[in-house]
Each structure stands twice: as C-alpha cells, then as structure tokens.
Image (cartoon, rainbow, N blue to C red):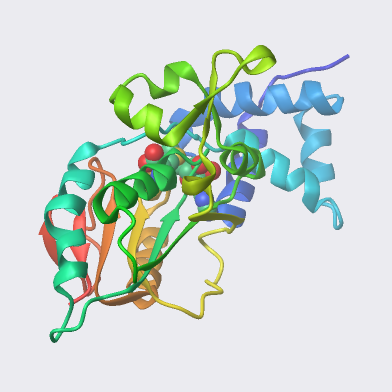
C-alpha cells in the first residue's frame, strides 16, 4: 500500500539532497509543498513510501530519476513579458547603447542568457523585444541561450507552444506578428514563429555547477531563481555571473530579489538591475 506520509526525517533527507544537487533551499515551511510534489512522483513511480524512494534516488546510476525528482520540486511559474520594467529598461537604455556602441564602434555580436528560463516565455519575450527594436537591421549577430535544470520545462520551451490564455496580456498586434494560431487538434494553442524560435537555443544547465561558456554575455537574466537559494549559493552565483559577462554587461534579477547583503563587484543601476563596470 502506498503511503505519502512525510516524516520530519524524510523531509530533512530530501531537503538536504535537493540543496546539495541544485542549491534550492527547502526550509521547514516547505514541508507540505515537498509532500504534495514528491507524493505525485511516488504515485507515478510506484514506490511504496518516501523512504524507499529516497533509497532509490541516492543509489548510483539512478541519476535519471534524480532529474525527475528535481523537475517535480522546482517552481516554474513564469509569463511572457513578466516584470515589464525590465523590458522598458532594455528599450530605453540597453538596446540604444548597442547602437551607440563603445569607442565609436557599434556592438554587433550580442549574446544573451536567460538563466532559469522555465518554459521559455522569458527568452522568447527577449527575442521579440530584440526583433521589435532592431527589426531586420543588418549587421547584428544576436543569439539567446535559455537554460534550466528542469528537463520538463525545457521540452515545453523548445516546442514553443502555449495555450491562448498565456498570451492574453500581449497586444494582439504582437501576437499576430510573432505567433501562429493552432487549428484542428491545436485549436486554443499558439506557437512561437520560427523567426523567433531560431534566435533561442535551449540547454539543460545546473546553475550551481561550473559554467561551460567560452563566450561572454552582454546580458544575463536570472529572475526569480536566486530566491530559492540561500545567501552563500546566491553569492557564489552572483560572482559567477559577473565573470560570465562582458564589460558593461548587465545582470537582471527578479524585482523581489536583491544582491544587498552579499559580496559582489557589480554596480547597482536600479532595483533588480546591476552592471559590470
Ligand atoms: C520561478 S522560475 C523563473 C522563470 C523566469 N526566469 C521568470 O522569472 O519568469 C525558476 C526556474 O529556476 C529553475 N531552477 C531552479 N534551480 C535551478 C538550478 N540549480 N539550476 C538551473 N535552474 C534552476 C527552475 O527549474 C525554474 O524553472
């Protein structure tokens, strides 16, 4: 018989494992969330209780289930053009600075990273903003990388298919220009057009592991991700982001987040916007 009883000991063991493997800090108040989300995973896998599931997870060679467990535990809430002040700042300050360039030279090769991109709404919103601003202006070489730890949300992101309700807050002119309406079995869904999808590459990446990048980014968005980490993980990550940026590159974090209280070298620009000097 299946039991989804989560003892304090089980909870501590799972929260330690999650912290160790992806930096997410599950404090005592998250016990019910863990029970509900992992309980669903128990039912799907057929383990009889959390103890048996934990044992399986921590055995060598069971990394595939560990990925599923982290998928189940992570919070993936997101939306198109979430926290629109960042998009205003892009249009008013960041994009014009690329055109103005540095030392009289236009910045042409532009690299962006949505770190913790969830189901893709964030990098696609950025791609649409770039297309709206730069239009078809020749000479810009633009690429966006979207990464997340969850394989489930990455699959949705790659597909680029969203229920109509998720597009409701976007002007209909933008929807018409950048999304294809589904018909038949796809009725009620929209797909991001190929011109937008082609700008974004999605990859699985665990932010607490070393970054594999050879090229620096002009802008990193890591919004509503660090909130799940404790201070020391946030500090390490902020410094890794600093190293991964170009000179004058920007870091955007969520509006409810701050780098106050951690050691970093960024220049504070405005709430949730930091720049590498
Ligand atoms: C709340 S969503 C934020 C999505 C988007 N950035 C936004 O603001 O709308 C947080 C995302 O961070 C991802 N995440 C959590 N821990 C992570 C880690 N260690 N490495 C990579 N991604 C992680 C989760 O899977 C989730 O998709």
In depth, the one of 247 and 227 nearer the eye is 247
In depth, the one of 215 and 211 nearer the eye is 215
Place residue 136 in its image quadrant.
bottom left
Residue drawn 19% across the image and 83% down it: 105
Q: Quadrant of the C terminus?
A: bottom left
The correct choice, above or below, for 247 with respect to 28 in the image is below
Residue drawn 85% across the image and 57% down it: 60
In depth, the one of 45 and 134 nearer the eye is 134
116 left or right, relative to 8: left
- Residue 24 seen by the camera: no
Residue drawn 54% across the image and 72% down it: 210
17 left or right, relative to 246: right
Residue drawn 54% across the image and 44% down it: 194
The correct choice, above or below, for 234 with respect to 121 in the image is below
Q: How many marks?
A: 0
Question: Residue 1: where, in percent of width, then height?
Answer: 88, 14
The correct choice, above or below, for 165 with respect to 246 in the image is above
The correct choice, above or below, for 244 with respect to 35 in the image is below
Question: Residue 9: where, in percent of width, then height?
Answer: 65, 36
Question: Residue 149: where, in percent of width, then height?
Answer: 58, 50
Question: Residue 56: where, in percent of width, then height?
Answer: 84, 43
- Residue 40 seen by the camera: yes
In depth, the one of 67 and 114 nearer the eye is 114
């Amino acid at each position: 018989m299946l039991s989804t009883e989560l003892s304090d000991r089980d909870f501590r063991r799972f929260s330690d494992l999650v912290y160790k493997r992806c930096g997410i800090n599950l404090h005592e108040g998250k016990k019910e969330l863990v029970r509900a989300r992992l309980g669903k995973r128990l039912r799907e896998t057929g383990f009889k209780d959390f103890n048996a599931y934990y044992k399986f997870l921590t055995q060598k060679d069971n990394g595939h289930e560990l990925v599923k467990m982290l998928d189940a535990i992570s919070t993936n809430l997101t939306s198109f053009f979430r926290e629109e002040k960042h998009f205003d700042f892009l249009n008013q300050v960041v994009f014009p600075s690329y055109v103005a360039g540095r030392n009289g030279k236009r910045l042409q090769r532009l690299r962006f990273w949505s770190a913790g991109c969830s189901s893709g709404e964030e990098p696609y919103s950025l791609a649409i903003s770039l297309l709206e601003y730069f239009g078809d202006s020749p000479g810009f070489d633009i690429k966006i990388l979207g990464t997340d730890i969850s394989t489930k949300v990455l699959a949705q992101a790659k597909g680029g298919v969203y229920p109509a309700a998720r597009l409701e807050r976007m002007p209909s002119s933008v929807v018409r220009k950048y999304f294809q309406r589904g018909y038949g079995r796809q009725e009620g869904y929209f797909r991001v057009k190929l011109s937008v999808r082609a700008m974004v590459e999605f990859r699985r990446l665990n932010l607490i592991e070393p970054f594999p990048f050879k090229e620096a980014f002009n802008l990193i968005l890591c919004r509503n991700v660090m909130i799940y980490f404790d201070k020391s993980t946030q500090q390490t990550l902020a410094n890794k982001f600093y190293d991964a940026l170009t000179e004058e590159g920007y870091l955007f974090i969520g509006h409810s987040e701050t780098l106050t209280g951690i050691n970093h070298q960024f220049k504070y620009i405005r709430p949730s916007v930091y720049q590498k000097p």
